Amino acid sequence: MTKPVEESAALREIDERHPPIKTRRVSFDWTDTPLHWIPGDPLATHIINSFHIVLPEGEKWFIQCVKDARPHIRDERLLEEIKGFIGQEMVHARSHQGVLDQILQAQGIDVSRITGPAGRGNAERPAQMAALKAKSPRAWRRRLRFELAAVASIEHYTAVLGQWILDNDRLDKAGVDPTMLDLLRWHGAEEVEHRSVVFDVYKAIGGRYPTRVVAWVVSLFFLYWALIGGSLFLLKQDPTVQKVSLPRVLRAYRRSVRAGHVPGIFKLLLGEAPVYLRPSHHPSQVCSTPRALDYLMRSPAARAAGYDPY
């Protein structure tokens, strides 16, 4: 469970309303990255690879939801944060797609059974929302609020995971591929940086606590499916893994958690419930913007992209 960040009043104010959220147009070279980029731990590799499967289309859905809400936002500062959020999420989607294309699919792992339906859903959503708005603006607002509440829930977990990977030096000691580790930490840092945006958009368009709770429950099931189902899906297709059975997977999972290669999935998802479901919760109360910005100043990919923190 994350704990509220204890910082000075000045840093809390930075967290409360982010510094300008910048789009860092990074790129990654996957030429030398192996399939099992956590050495000797295919399960932990594929648990995190499951994010690579869902994020390209997931990020596009996040963008659609925020774009739908943007015309109804009056707060100029929040509008600027939305602009930065959209730019960052576009680069996230492209970067994770590169992992799918250049690592997983290059090794014969076909993820189209998952990415195909998600892509079609994103392609069909604008027309569905337009038709719903024409038929019933009230129903359109209700659906948009629910989707934004779901995205805000997921954004809470991506920020918490981002903080975990920023703080976890055991991945360095395990010899994780440096390019992949930079992608994960760059992405995690930006998730921490923009963690309040969707939550604030949801509140700005009239989102209320009961919808936030229901959307969190739905998001929780999605995240369990993505992490557990995605990991098993990848293991079964991995040409180097000889046998996939539940007992073996559970033993490997416990070893990976003890080694610090992945967080405890069940503890993470359910352990955050008291934090996120607190009625007074705001994303600025968890994680550390200064810590995220510190990494972004050092990230090889961000530096190569010409990121100037000043």
Image: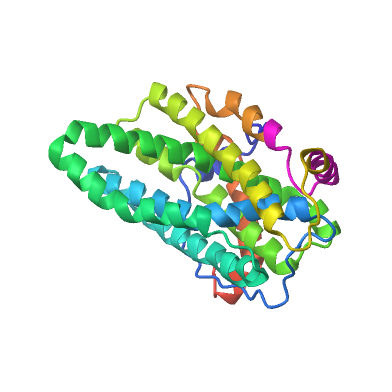
| Residue that appears at 28% across and 31% down | 142
Residue 292, horizontal then vertical, whole percent: 61, 53
Residue 205 in view in this figure: no
Residue 271, compared with residue 34, is above or below; it is above
Residue 155, compared with residue 109, is above or below; it is above
Residue 111 in view in this figure: yes
| Residue that appears at 74% across and 63% down | 239
Q: Quadrant of residue 265?
A: top right
Q: Identify which residue, 258 or 9, lies in the foreground.
A: 258
Q: Main secondary structure of the magenta part?
A: helix
Residue 87, horizontal then vertical, whole percent: 42, 61
Q: Identify which residue, 114 or 218, lies in the foreground.
A: 114
Residue 161, compared with residue 181, is above or below; it is above
Question: Is residue 225 inside the magenta stretch?
Answer: no
| Residue that appears at 77% across and 39% down | 246
Q: Quadrant of residue 308?
A: bottom right
What stretch of residues is rendered in magenta? Answer: 250-267
Please tell me how many numbered marks the rendered image carries. 0
